[in-house]
Image: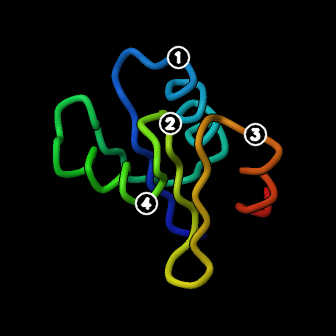
Amino acid sequence: MKKVQIYSTPTCHYCQMAKTFLKDNNVEYVEYNVAEDIEKREEMMKVSGQMGVPFIVIGEGEEEEGMIGFNEPKMRELLAL
């Protein structure tokens, strides 16, 4: 299974939808609360160029792909679900 990271905030509805999707499909992920973690917020902004959440990173290294927002078809494709 590919590495999954989700940058989110506690009040973000789409963040909750993305995490529910991952849990329902038994996909392990690492979550970063960018409302509280300033370092991760800055990292997210540097990588994505935006403040939008959720910012989801799937894969590692050269195969790493990031997306802003919850896009279920794209997540299914990248996770081979």
Residue at the image point whose x is 71% and y is 61% from the top: 79
Residue flagged by tag 1: what amino acid is it? His
Instruction: Determine contact: label 1, label 2, CB under 8 Å.
Output: no
Residue at the image point whose x is 56% and y is 39% from the top: 23
**Where residue 55 sits: x, y (%)?**
50, 44
| Towards the viewer: 24 or 60 | 60
Of tags 4 and 2, which is closer to the observer?
A: 4
Which type of secondary structure does the marked residue at label 3 adopt? helix
Q: CA distance from mark 1 to mark 3?
A: 14 Å
Marks 1 and 2, the one that precedes in the sequence: 1
Which residue lies under the disc numbered 4?
47
Which residue lies under the disc numbered 2?
54
| Towards the viewer: 39 or 15 | 39
**Where residue 13 sits: x, y (%)?**
53, 16
Residue 31 placement, left or right of 25? left
Of tags 3 and 2, which is closer to the observer?
A: 2
Task: Say if 48 sits above or below 51 in the image.
Answer: below
Q: CA distance from mark 1 to mark 4?
A: 22 Å
Residue 58 placement, left or right of 78? left
Task: Say if 61 sits above or below 69 in the image.
Answer: below
| Towards the viewer: 9 or 81 | 9
Q: CA distance from mark 1 to mark 2?
A: 9 Å
The image quadrant of residue 72 is top right
Marks 3 and 4, the one that precedes in the sequence: 4
Task: Say if 42 sits above or below 69 in the image.
Answer: below
- Image disc number at residue 74: none
Which residue lies under the disc numbered 1?
13
Which residue lies under the disc numbered 3?
72
Q: CA distance from mark 4 to mark 2?
A: 13 Å
